Image: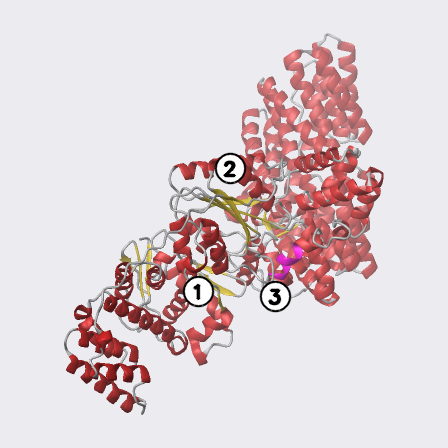
């Protein structure tokens, strides 16, 4: 036996025969309380009463939660967790098979004894009474437990004892039980029935005087203890003893035999729903599991769980029909009414199942345990499939399980019945909504059956509006089937723009409605879970974490975790990737409706403010850690966050995971408030949006933030939004707009006296000037920014600015100075702890250092630096940085003569640049791809690519790209022996380079004109 718990005496616990001590008294009281109610939920007040009594702590629920956690730890043996205690909405339940508790074994033996002949009855009762080792729970210190619960146990022992002695007397074994009866009367001296049995046993053993003496002894005890005389039954027995009544003598019992006719097979499944679109794989997997388990002699038990309307019953019934040939003795179907106010009691369901099996009327035992044993016996040699539909809990199902492998059970429930898996070897199947393709197939099939035609785009829209939920899909299809296809588009518009839940109902039949399907699940939750679901429905976000739920509901992490476990187990919430959770759209709409009824606008507003401020707190911390060179607005004060506890750090890819939620939060706060959240979140997203090249969303959120900052008159916010717009314009090579926007932001920062903000803008303005070929202006901006950063002690920003300044040095053909500047910046970053090093900034330095060493004629070292840079960029998800690194890496491989490798890298760079809308990088990638193609396939295909690069560079006004394209064309035309065109492009490249102060590129052009071996095309990073 795996677990063995004992309460019929002192409290004992063992696992695989190894005792497990439970020394703490409150843990013992808690465990005893749960054991006495095995398989049933014990409310929190009842447990608190038995553990603490009148000395209950102020925060009793929290204290009990902690105590349960400690007891679970106590019950953990080696690598086997103590997961027997399950949390329910109203309390706790000990999920334990009956055989693991001596009290349950006692009850089962007593119940079984009630249905057998006297000889077997005596044997069973003897075994039952042997389980008693003393006073029940005698070593557990709980006044309430001993006052409220233990007396009932003692009464069960006494009743069983009296039945046992009656049976032994019936069998004529009066001599054998005299000693046992004397011990029993000493243990329960006020129990008159035991004294009467002792008197009768002594009389039948020929000891009449001792029998009368026993009566006198009883009379003395009752007079001393209670001041009463023995009752009439015992007095009558004494009188019969005095008369030597012959009827008191033992006579052998008459034999009795009851033969029940065999029960005919019963086939009760509802009609087969037919094809289940999107479920074929699930159906086949379950069918194989049931057939295999039955063949191996195991009980095939399948628990099908899922959200309201997901198709659990249809799946179970369909499976039942598919398995009809495997279970020839019947397919039984029972509704357990788990979502109704009055649920089916196991006692009543057992009576129903016993009737199906042929055990009827008086032949059925009185107790649930005895009926469960009788059902197992009745099904021992039969092959029956039982479908238990709509179960509320594992406790409701467990008594109904057959004991033989020849039978099978399919259970459906809106809750995950983990105990059936853990304790009974069941298989859990969680149904999700259908895939979009399966949902469309279901609608199409229904429309085909009704001979109506609906346009494909309407079918797809309808499936999406139904959230691919089977019940919603069938209701919508039924409504269109009755209204006709002409109403299809209007119906879709009503669902999209109107009362969607109301539209997903069959007119005139309130039973067939999505609201009616969801309502029981919602109503069955506790107060905390209902409130949490309502507030989740009120958010504009798509998914959430435990921390988000804690913020919404204003509770700590453990409390939020308990609520989330219940919501997930009830399939009102589904786990998603990365520790996040989602709620089906239709359930969200129902929850939002309930919130509008049960929560005040202020309560919803406060909850959303806590959620959005929680986003801002996390975004602020991660932005400052991930982009230390950037300057961010000071974080505004907000609600006290109980959710941001140590031990719950957010992952580095948090911005990616929360991207949709952050956009939704900005849009919501811009419209409904708090408005400052809009521009502050937009400010923290700047680095991530720049890395990923999400230009459309970047402009949208910054413009929203700018509008709100202007509306509230927050000049710091206005300056930050103008600066972000300028950075966006620079990323899109809109340099004129970028300069104008940066100067607008700079003027505000000067007026505010914000030197850190000024330095950041000057640094970025230097980049714009550099890209435009205004290297003198760029150097001046960098020098001013560098001075401010050093005065402010902002080391990260200083190193980044130093790296940018070195790029200007490189452009001016001051290559050794540029390499030294990059090395100085790298030394600064390397001095930081590994955990705090800004990977993207380090990658920038590696990139620019690679450009420098290439110019010094060391392409192999450049490959090393660039490969490292690409690794770092991939870690942070910077696609723009990856593209620039790949472009330079391809160029370095061209230098080394590995043209095929270079072509692959340049093509990858081009694909990324086009995907993220970085036209500057696209122009550079075309030029590099052209030079790689030249080495592989000759001038013809290379010229086409280089002409594309030239056209794009001119279109966006990017001088460096024009120069590189001209130099590449010069090399290609020379390879084609077209010297005039080669010289023309080399001269044009030199002129453009000198005009833009790109002296390094001008030197390369001059080398081509002088007919020397051209140097590699070099392009520093931004």
| Residue located 36% across and 63% down the image | 107
Structural crowding at the residue carrying mark 1, measured as other residues with C-alpha within 10 Å and reported as few (<14), some (14–19) or many (≥20) = many
Q: CA–CA distance between discs 1 and 3?
A: 21 Å
Marker count (numbered): 3
Q: Is residue 94 above or below residue 437?
A: below
Residue that numbered label 1 is attached to: 68
Q: Residue 92: percent from the left, percent from the top?
A: 47, 64
Q: Quadrant of the C terminus?
A: top right
Q: CA–CA distance between discs 2 and 1?
A: 43 Å
Query: On the image, which quarter does residue 859 sit in?
Result: top right
- In the image, which disc is placed on residue 527? 3
Sequence order check: which comes first, mark 3 or mark 2? 2
On whether residue 345 falls in the magenta region, the answer is no
Which residue appears farthest toward the top when viewing the image? 977
Question: Circle 3 — which element?
Answer: helix
Magenta segment: 518-524
Query: On the image, which quarter does residue 173 sit in?
Result: bottom left
Q: Is residue 314 above or below residue 365?
A: above
Sequence order check: which comes first, mark 2 or mark 1? 1
- Report whether 802 appears left or right of 970: left
- Report whether 401 appears left or right of 734: left
Structural crowding at the residue carrying mark 3, measured as other residues with C-alpha within 10 Å and reported as few (<14), some (14–19) or many (≥20) = few
Structural crowding at the residue carrying mark 2, measured as other residues with C-alpha within 10 Å and reported as few (<14), some (14–19) or many (≥20) = some
């Amino acid at each position: 036996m795996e677990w063995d718990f004992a309460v019929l005496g002192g409290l004992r616990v063992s696992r695989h025969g190894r005792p497990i001590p439970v020394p703490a008294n409150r843990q013992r009281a808690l465990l005893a309380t749960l054991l006495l109610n095995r398989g049933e939920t014990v409310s929190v007040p009842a447990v608190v009463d038995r553990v603490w009594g009148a000395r209950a702590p102020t925060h009793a629920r929290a204290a009990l939660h902690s105590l349960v956690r400690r007891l679970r730890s106590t019950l953990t043996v080696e690598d086997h967790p103590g997961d027997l205690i399950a949390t329910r909405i109203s309390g706790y339940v000990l999920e334990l098979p009956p055989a693991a508790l001596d009290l349950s074994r006692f009850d089962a033996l007593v119940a079984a004894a009630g249905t057998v002949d006297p000889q077997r009855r005596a044997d069973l009762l003897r075994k039952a009474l042997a389980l008693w080792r003393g006073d029940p729970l005698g070593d557990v210190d709980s006044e309430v437990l001993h006052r409220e619960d233990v007396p009932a146990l003692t009464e069960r022992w006494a009743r069983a004892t009296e039945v046992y002695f009656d049976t032994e007397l019936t069998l004529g074994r009066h001599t054998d039980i005299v000693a046992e009866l004397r011990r029993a009367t000493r243990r329960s001296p006020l129990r008159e029935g035991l004294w009467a049995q002792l008197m009768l046993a002594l009389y039948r053993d020929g000891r009449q005087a001792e029998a009368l003496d026993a009566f006198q002894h009883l009379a003395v005890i009752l007079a001393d203890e209670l001041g009463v005389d023995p009752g009439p039954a015992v007095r009558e027995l004494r009188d019969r003893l005095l008369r030597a009544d012959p009827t008191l003598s033992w006579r052998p019992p008459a034999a009795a035999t009851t033969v029940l006719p065999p029960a005919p097979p019963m086939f009760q499944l509802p009609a087969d729903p037919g094809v289940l679109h999107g479920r074929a794989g699930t159906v086949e997997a379950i069918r194989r599991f049931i057939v295999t388990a039955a063949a191996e002699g195991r009980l095939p038990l399948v628990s099908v769980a899922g959200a309201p309307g997901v198709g659990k019953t249809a799946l179970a019934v369909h499976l039942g029909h598919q398995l009809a040939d495997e279970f020839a003795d019947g397919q039984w179907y029972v509704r357990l009414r788990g979502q109704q106010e009055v649920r089916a009691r196991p006692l009543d369901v057992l009576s129903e199942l016993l009737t199906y099996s042929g055990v009827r009327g008086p032949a059925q035992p009185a107790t649930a345990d005895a009926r469960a044993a009788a059902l197992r016996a009745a099904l021992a040699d039969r092959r029956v499939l039982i479908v238990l539909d709509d179960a509320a809990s594992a406790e409701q199902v467990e008594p109904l399980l057959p004991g033989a492998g020849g039978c099978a059970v399919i259970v459906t429930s809106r809750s995950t019945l983990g105990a059936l898996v853990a304790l009974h070897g069941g298989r859990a199947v969680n149904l999700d909504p259908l895939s979009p393709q399966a949902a469309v197939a279901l609608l199409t099939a229904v429309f085909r059956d009704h001979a109506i035609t609906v346009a494909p785009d309407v079918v797809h829209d309808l499936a999406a509006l139904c959230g691919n939920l089977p019940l919603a899909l069938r209701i919508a299809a039924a409504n269109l089937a009755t209204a006709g296809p002409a109403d299809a588009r209007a119906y879709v518009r009503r669902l999209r723009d109107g009362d969607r839940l109301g539209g997903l109902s069959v007119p005139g039949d309130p039973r067939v409605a999505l609201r009616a399907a969801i309502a029981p699940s919602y109503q069955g939750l506790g107060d905390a879970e209902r409130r949490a679901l309502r507030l989740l429905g009120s958010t504009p976000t798509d998914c959430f974490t435990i921390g988000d739920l804690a913020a919404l509901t204003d509770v700590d992490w453990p409390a939020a975790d308990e609520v989330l476990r219940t919501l997930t187990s009830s399939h009102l919430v589904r786990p998603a990737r990365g520790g996040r959770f989602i709620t089906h759209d239709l359930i969200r709409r129902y929850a939002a409706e309930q919130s509008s009824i049960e929560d005040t606008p202020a309560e919803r507003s406060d909850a959303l403010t806590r959620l959005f401020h929680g986003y801002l707190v996390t975004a602020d911390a991660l932005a400052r850690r991930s982009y230390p060179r950037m300057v961010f607005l000071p974080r505004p004060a907000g609600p006290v966050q109980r959710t941001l506890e140590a031990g719950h750090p957010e992952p580095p890819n948090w911005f990616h995971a929360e991207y949709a939620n952050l956009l939704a939060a900005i849009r919501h706060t811009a419209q409904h408030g708090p408005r400052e959240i809009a521009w502050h979140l937009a400010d923290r997203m700047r680095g991530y949006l720049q890395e990923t090249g999400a230009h459309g969303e970047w402009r949208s959120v910054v413009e929203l933030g700018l509008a709100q900052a202007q509306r509230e008159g927050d000049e710091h916010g206005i300056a930050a939004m103008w600066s972000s717009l300028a950075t966006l314009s620079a990323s899109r090579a809109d340099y004129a707009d970028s300069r104008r926007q940066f100067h607008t932001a700079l003027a505000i920062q000067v007026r505010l006296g914000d030197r850190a903000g000024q330095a950041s803008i000057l640094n970025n303005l230097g980049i714009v000037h550099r890209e435009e070929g205004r290297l003198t202006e760029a150097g001046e901006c960098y020098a001013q920014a560098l001075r401010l950063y050093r005065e402010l002690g902002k080391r990260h920003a200083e190193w980044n600015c130093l790296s940018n300044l070195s790029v200007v040095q490189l452009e001016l053909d001051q290559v050794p100075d540029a390499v030294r500047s990059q090395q100085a910046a790298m030394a600064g970053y390397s001095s930081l702890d590994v955990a705090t090093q800004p990977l993207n900034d380090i990658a920038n330095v590696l990139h620019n250092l690679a450009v420098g060493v290439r110019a010094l004629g060391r392409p192999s070292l450049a490959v090393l630096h660039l490969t490292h840079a690409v690794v770092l960029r991939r870690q942070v998800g910077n696609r723009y940085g990856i593209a620039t690194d790949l472009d330079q890496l391809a160029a370095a491989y061209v230098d080394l003569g590995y043209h095929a490798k270079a072509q692959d890298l340049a093509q990858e760079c081009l694909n990324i640049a086009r995907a993220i809308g970085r036209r500057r990088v696209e122009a550079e990638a075309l030029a590099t791809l052209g030079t790689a193609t030249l080495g592989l396939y000759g001038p013809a295909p290379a010229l086409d690519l280089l002409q594309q690069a030239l056209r794009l560079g001119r279109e966006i006004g990017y001088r460096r790209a024009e120069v590189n394209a001209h130099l590449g064309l010069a090399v290609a035309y020379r390879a084609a022996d077209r010297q005039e065109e080669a010289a023309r492009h080399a001269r044009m490249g030199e002129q453009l380079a000198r005009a833009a102060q790109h002296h390094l590129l001008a030197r390369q052009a001059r080398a081509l004109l002088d007919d020397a071996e051209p140097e590699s095309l070099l392009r520093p990073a931004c």
